[in-house]
Image (cartoon, rainbow, N blue to C red):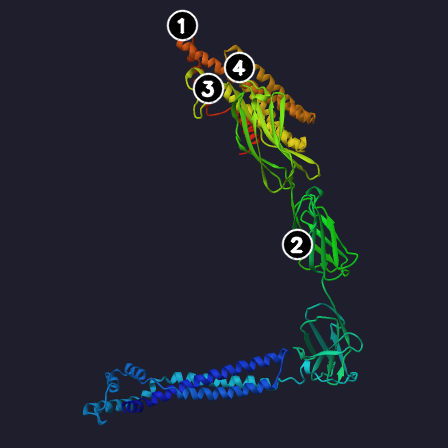
Amino acid sequence: MIDKVLANCLRPIIQAESRLRGRKALALVLGTGTIAALVLLALWLGQQWWSWAAVFALLGAMVFLIVLALAWASSQRPNLRELAHQVEEKHPDLRAALLTAMDQKPKKDGSFSYLQTQVFGRVTEHAIQNQWVRQVSKRRLAAAGWLQGLMLLAFCLAFGALLWKRPGTAPIAEAPPVTDPVEAPADVEITVTPGDAEVEKGSRMVVEANFTGRLPKGATLVLSEPGENGTEIGRIPMQAGLDDNIFSGLIAKVDSDQRYRIDFEKEKSETFSITTFEHPKLKKSDATITPPDYVESDPKTIEDTRKVSLMEGSNLEWSIEVNKPVAMGELFGEDETVIPLKPSADDPTRLVAAYVPEKTQKYRLHLVDDRDRVNKRPPWFTVNVKKNLPPKLDFIFPKRDVEVSSVQELPVEAKVWDDVAVLKAGAVFQYGDKEETLVLLDEKKPGGKHHAIQTLYAIEKLGAKPRELVSYHLFAEDIGPDGKVRLSESDQFFAEVRHFEDIFREGQGQSGPPGEQGQGQAEQLLKLQKEVMNAGWKVLRRQNMGRKLEELQDDIGVIRESQLIAAQQTAEAIEKVEDAELKQIFLDAKKIMEQAALDFQQTVEKQEPETLKVAYNGTRKAYEKLIEARAREHNVTQSEQQSQSGQPQEQQQQLMNLELKQKEMKYQEESQAQQEQQTAEQKENLEVLNKLKELARRQE
């Protein structure tokens, strides 16, 4: 009962809310119908589709949705408590009387108490006096009404345009057969553009009809198959443009050759031809790779590819399929080399080319047809040429210079790798003019794998004596790019023969002032001469692998200048040495160095490759002489130490004077090294020695 009382009080607000919902729902339905009508109109204007059934279906759907929207708006039940809160917020003078009334409960007999009756009366009186219907803004109701009216107007306009712009002819697929119209009378002239045309296949084409004299009510573009009696394949209504006497029609896609004419009223224009063409383009490309004979591998065909990798010396044959015969085709390289493509005898649309690529590079495919049309966006072809590299030789042990006794066995372990195949591998030991070659791998091994080689070599076989030098290096043979056997050699390492009774421990160094100065001279020269020798060996290896002297002359010049610097430092050491035997050893070493430098110079000047090995042997002999100098210094040092403990007092005094003289000379050298500026000659020598270190660097 309380709900009925409150509903009577809130009835104006409930009715206003219902009208607001109804107007919004109708505006939404009308807006949706307007959009649907515009879509149908756009489809017809684009000559894509038309159906009366769709028009009637749209109208019926609109009526159904309007009825459904009105029923929905009237069936919605308002929330009385929410409306009461809104009234209380707008009319605070009620002092929560409306909410209080909603919370009242009648007596068992259904009647109300005096106070409850007073509350209901006050609420009813306040609703009448203050017109609670204003709770729903008149502005909101008016806006919803205007929106509803605008949507109704828009729908009527769109639907009217749809009915007024309906097509006057049947769609292309349902076009009834028409009889050929008669020729146009003389008072109407028509000019058709472009007339006979040649267009790219798949492109659009616009046809214009320019009328002079009497203007027709409409015009139609009629398409037919090629030939005099070609079957009609479509009719396209033409639209008048800004200039009323010009009608235009759009052929959305021209897929094949065809004919067209313009029909207007009961007349027709001349019939014109449309010829289609295509730009040349790539359809598919296959590659056949024939490796060189030494690889001993069968030819391989890669289908539908534009990127290949092949071994140096391989024959590459391209088979390129295009969409039509062309007048010219080529692969144009990044270095501007041209690989011509010729049509196959069996198929003119297949272009072939065979050649031996020399280096890795990219090519662009250029095609030109008989009308000088080129291919759009020429594709890239990539040819990756893998060089036939020489074998890689790596020492595993000892991989450094060592000292051995004359009766010791030197263990050598290494591994060899090649990209094709290893034919032979081993080690070479050299002592003086003697040389011994050990073949450690005498059968062909497949490429792409590491193969171990090792030996235990007896130094005693060479007859080497203490303080003499034994050198050793690895070698391997494979097949080069020219199909011939190719020799490769590794870095060279050295084994110095020590006395059998000498004992050397890692980390121990020479100590004591008496031998320190003399020992440093020989060691410094040995270090420099070893770099000269290693650099000479590296250049000799390159020559043995086929490099020409013109390519090596800069490196040979660095070695020659470094050898002269070593000879100059040896001359400076001679002036400081007092021992006669040691001085003679330095003199002999200096002569050998100077002769080696002269041999290097003749190698470049006279272009005599054989003198390069003679020059290298000279660097080796100079190094062996310096080893003798170091041994002599060692003997002198031992003698000095013995004389200090057991010789008479006069000899000990002489040794003390010699020691003081050596210290004075050392101090002078250190003072000279601390000078702020270096001479031009020193700077030049330092630059040459830095280049020598880089050239002499052995494999890490």
- Tell me the element at label 2: loop
Residue 217 falls in image quadrant: bottom right
Name above or below for residue 170 compared with residue 605: below
Residue where numbered disc 3 is placed: 669
Q: Is residue 57 left or right of residue 330?
A: left
Disc 2: CA contacts within 10 A as few (<14), some (14-19) or many (>=20): some
- In space, the residues marked 2 and 1 are separated at their CA atoms by 92 Å
Q: Is residue 97 visible?
A: yes
The nearer-to-camera label among 3 and 1 is 1
- Contact, CB < 8 Å: mark 1 with mark 4? no
- In space, the residues marked 3 and 2 are separated at their CA atoms by 68 Å
Quarter of the image for the N terminus: give it.
bottom left
Q: Which residue reaches farthest right?
A: 228
- In space, the residues marked 3 and 1 are separated at their CA atoms by 32 Å
The three-letter amino acid code for the residue at tag 2 is: Arg
Residue 115 falls in image quadrant: bottom left
Q: Is residue 413 left or right of residue 305?
A: left
In the rendered structure, find residue 648 and report the number of the disc placed on it: 1
- Tell me the element at label 1: loop
In the rendered structure, find residue 574 and report the number of the disc placed on it: 4
- In space, the residues marked 3 and 4 are separated at their CA atoms by 15 Å
The three-letter amino acid code for the residue at tag 1 is: Pro
In the rendered structure, find residue 306 and report the number of the disc placed on it: 2
The three-letter amino acid code for the residue at tag 4 is: Ile
Disc 4: CA contacts within 10 A as few (<14), some (14-19) or many (>=20): many
The nearer-to-camera label among 2 and 1 is 1
